[in-house]
Image: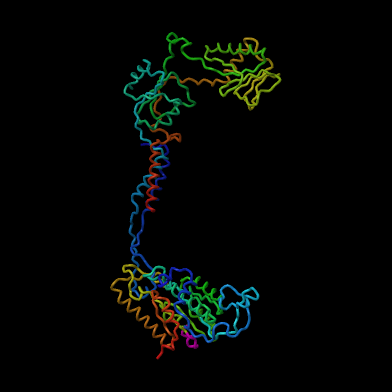
Amino acid sequence: MTSMQPLWWFALPVLLLPVWWHMRKRERTRTDLLATARFLPAAAPQQQRVLRWTDVLLLLVRLALLATLIAWLAVVAMPWKGDTVFIDPSLETSPWAAQQVQSAGMGAAAREPLPADLWNWLARNEHEWRPGARFLILAPGAAMPALPPRLAHATDLRLAPPPAAASEPPAATRMQPRERHIVVSAPAERLPRWQALFTAFGTAADGANRYVLSDTPTAVTELIVWDHADTDPPASWKAPLWWRTTNTNGQTQTPQGLTWTAPQWPVQDVDAARALYERWQAAIAPAPAYPMRAQALKAERSHPLPTPLARSPEWLALALLALFVIERILTHARRR
Amino acid sequence: MLETPALLAHSADLELVIRHVLAGLGHGIHAGRERGAGVEFSEYRAYAPGDEWRRVDWKLLARADRYYVREAERDSHVATWLVLDATASMAEPSRRVDGLSKHWYARTALACVAAIAQRQGDAFGLLVVSNGKVEFTPASRGPRHLQRVLAALQRATPSGVLPDAETLRASLHFARSQSMLFAATDALDWPSPLGEALVRLRHMRHDVRLLALRTEAEAEADFATGHAYRDPEAGAGLHSFTRADRDAYSAALESHFAAVRTACRQHDVPLCEARIEQPLGEILRKWLRNPEARRP
């Protein structure tokens, strides 16, 4: 059993509080006032300190409640998982994956789908695995984290070889083109040129994108082209990116979105169109991650690091709630 | 209606209790030297709440459309002093009747005496002896003064011990002219500064009447055994009560009250002993009866 927040165990003396509350020093003799007591024989005070437990059931429930609360705060974990293969869903059926599992000697190991944020996820949840357990990670590619991962379990990262070009299915059936919503507002004589430009953009990147032109923006609109130099667009129009015609070249940030301005829209020659396209794609596409090599990582420490990211299991919180309810009910019943 | 002390004790209204007790008592308890109000007419006075209706002049009402009360020229020579012992031991409850205590009984008896004195036109004053102090209400006449005295009686709560002899001597300077003194106490402190003061007043030829209150449980040694008992005035000492102690207790209590009786007889102070479970009217009649009439 390990604890991710071991400092919370110092709160254990709180358990003494209910013990103290339920311990009663009982007086053996009850005293009454009596006006004629002076005519009675004097008696030695007979008060005994007899330890007595009151409401043992309530005491036990309160102790359990506090202990559960501390365990929940201390993020107690019982490591029960053994060797595990993390495998990307796309590789589930591939012969390469089966061969890797065999060669790593992990045929009997449990399989789990590859989590999205792999290294952080492993650091957060590592405490669920037994100390000697090994990880085998089968993925088509892995992003290099800023720091090399230092886990408490030996980890083997294996990357699937890139699929051969021949075995690749034709592009048309491989994926549907992604729809990009564009709003174009331009004078009638320039509108066909804008349509031609976006049709040309549609052929780039192997047809991965299909540009849908419309008149009014919606929530999915990515780009608004405002090709009127003399008027302003309606204030309610909003989009991440605007192309507007003004007399200066530049880029400004407005409440309606980032605006690129140029005196002469749409671009006339092929090179300018290509430059615009590349600039646009670079602006909206995230930078690709640096790929990580396939490698075997040794266990860097014997126990997982305590991490504030670790969370207690839900059933413990439910048990805490149930104990609290029982304690309230018992207290109420005692008062009646 | 309110036949027993048990029922009376549940009435918070002291005036109602007085009216009830006095209704059963009738008149002529104490022959005042003066006749009733209005023997020698002196003046008219505007009616004030609390005045008796029979003293309103109805002819004047018909003439002036206002209520006027006929005031009489009268002056009783007898002042009545009421002494209430409100020490902690007076809180002793009756262990038979709920809500009844020595304090309640003494207070109500004194309120009845005050009401009688007011009806007869006597001046009356009050001394509440409590918590080592004496609370003094000067003697006066009239219905408003009765209200004042009743309020002082209502206010009194049993606590503390008797004041010492010095304090009492300083507070008893009032008795110049001949007066009657009605003292209600439990007489458990005897000899006590209060007893000595009363005896001294008796020697000054005042008419001192003592009411000594006990509960039935006390008199018959009939309270729960096996408890430890504490004296409310003596501090922390504990006393035990078992069946074997019963006779010794009865003997000690009896000898104490015998000493009280002897002292009272010796100094010619009429002593009226009562148990608070007894009807208040009877006890009041016994207390107020002229002691000379009883003597052979």
Q: Does the magenta stretch include residue B249?
A: no
Colour scheme of this structure image?
rainbow
Q: Can the viewer see residue B120 in this picture?
A: yes
Query: Does residue A168 lie above or below A155 as drawn?
Result: above
Name the main secondary structure of what is drawn in magenta.
helix
Front residue of A131 and A126? A126
Q: Where is residue B147 in the image (x, y as percent from the top left)?
A: 54, 73
Query: Does residue A274 lie above or below A300 as drawn?
Result: above
* Residue segment shown in magenta: B198-207
Q: Where is residue A219 in the image (x, y as percent from the top left)?
A: 57, 24
Please identify the residue farthest to the bottom as the structure is shown. Answer: B296
Q: Can the viewer see residue B237 in this picture?
A: no
How many numbered discs sit on the rendered protein? 0
Q: Give me the residue at 51% from left, 76% from top.
A: B134
Quadrant showing the N terminus of chain A: top left
Query: Does residue A123 lie above or below A264 as drawn?
Result: below
Q: Position of residue B184 (x, y in %)?
A: 45, 78
Front residue of B9 and A187? B9
Q: Position of residue A156 (x, y in %)?
A: 39, 23
Quarter of the image where one finds residue A99: top left
Please identify the residue farthest to the left as the structure is shown. Answer: B244
Front residue of A219 and A312? A219
Task: Using residue B80 as the reference point, say whether residue A69 is left or right of it.
Answer: left
